[in-house]
């Protein structure tokens, strides 16, 4: 059972590539950001708890994230593998997630999408005109990038040491990046 993680800063193309990849591989695409945005939109207790964090580009606490992820990956559609978009994002999340995957007898592959910072900014600026996301504005993006470099980027080293890291150049057309992902994951 294959478990794929897409790692990369805001605007790297995690969501864009994950949708295509999940379809090509026939496994569900799980975006923690989408799960939280759905919770916010529904006005649930979880949504109320995480709204101000998401709107300001801060991370949701690890224990809250892990509860949501545990619940999602225990569903039947994940039993033949799944694709994580946006999780894990901290070292404690990576450790706990690794344990969950082991318990499911899963094989973990982590893809880092590498994209130059100016391109990330341009992409999010472009998306902000249509996404309706409260965190798609210049000020919050600066914070999301800061949070990424401080809290999430150390995962690159973490997974490299475990021999689970695949680096993919995310600066290309959507189609070219997808082709590269499929070839590196096969
Ligand atoms: P999340 O939803 O994961 O947001 P993010 O990491 O900031 O990333 P984005 O969704 O902005 O970018 P993406 O890499 O998916 O790029 P996309 O494909 O859209 O998280 C949001 C929030 O939720 C966090 O800030 C946090 O509060 C919370 N959260 C989520 N997970 C958490 C966790 N594990 N722990 C704690 N908190 C968590 O592409 C961007 C744009 O570029 C699009 O317009 C797209 O069309 C375009 N584009 C993509 N690829 C290309 C290409 N190759 N060429 C040209 N344009 C492209
Ligand atoms: Mg996304």
Image (spheres, rainbow, N blue to C red):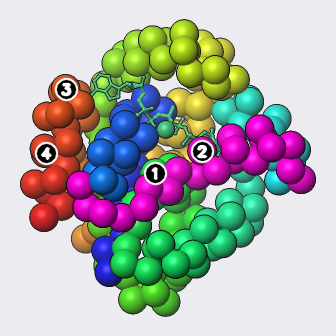
Q: CA distance from mark 1 to mark 3?
A: 19 Å
Asked if labels 1 and 2 touch by Cβ distance under 8 angstroms, the answer is: yes
Give the residue at x 34% y 18%.
119
Label 1, ligand 2: CB separation under 8 Å: yes
Q: Which residues are magenta?
A: 24-45
Position in image of residue 155 (x %, y %): 43, 57
Within 10 Å of the Cα at label 4, are there few (<14), some (14-19), or many (20+) other Cα atoms? some
Asked if labels 2 and 3 touch by Cβ distance under 8 angstroms, the answer is: no
Task: Name the N-terminal-most of marks 3 and 4.
Answer: 3
Give the residue at x 16% y 53%.
182
Position in image of residue 63 (x %, y %): 74, 66
Q: Quadrant of the C terminus?
A: bottom left
Asked if labels 4 and 1 touch by Cβ distance under 8 angstroms, the answer is: no
- SS label for mark 2: helix
Where, by quadrant of the figure, is residue 102 drawn?
A: bottom left
Task: Name the N-terminal-most of marks 4 and 2.
Answer: 2
Asked if labels 4 and 3 touch by Cβ distance under 8 angstroms, the answer is: no
Give the residue pinned by disc 4: 180
Give the residue at x 46% y 73%.
78
Asked if the stretch drawn in magenta spans residue 62, the answer is no
- SS label for mark 1: strand
Of 147 and 126, the residue lying toward us: 126
Give the residue pinned by disc 1: 85
Label 2, ligand 1: CB separation under 8 Å: yes
Q: Is 111 above or below relative to 38?
A: below
Does residue 84 appear to the left or right of 61 in the view shown?
Answer: left
Asked if labels 3 and 1 touch by Cβ distance under 8 angstroms, the answer is: no
Give the residue at x 31% y 74%.
2
Where, by quadrant of the figure, is residue 116 drawn?
A: top left
Foreground tag (2 vs 1):
2
Overall secondary structure of the magenta stretch? helix
């Amino acid at each position: 059972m294959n478990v794929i993680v897409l790692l990369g800063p805001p605007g790297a193309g995690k969501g864009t590539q994950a949708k295509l990849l999940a379809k090509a591989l026939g496994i569900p695409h799980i975006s923690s950001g989408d799960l939280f945005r759905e919770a916010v939109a529904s006005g649930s207790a979880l949504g109320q708890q995480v709204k101000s964090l998401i709107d300001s580009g801060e991370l949701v606490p690890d224990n809250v994230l892990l509860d949501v992820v545990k619940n999602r990956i225990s569903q039947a559609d994940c039993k033949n593998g799944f694709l994580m978009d946006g999780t894990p994002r901290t070292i404690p999340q990576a450790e706990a997630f690794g344990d969950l995957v082991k318990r499911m007898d899963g094989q973990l592959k982590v893809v880092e999408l590498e994209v130059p910072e100016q391109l990330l900014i341009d992409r999010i600026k472009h998306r902000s005109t249509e996404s309706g996301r409260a965190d798609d504005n210049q000020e919050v993006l600066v914070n999301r990038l800061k949070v990424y470099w401080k809290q999430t980027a150390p995962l690159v080293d973490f997974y490299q040491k475990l021999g689970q890291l695949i680096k993919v150049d995310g600066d290309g057309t959507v189609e070219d990046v997808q082709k590269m992902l499929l070839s590196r994951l096969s």
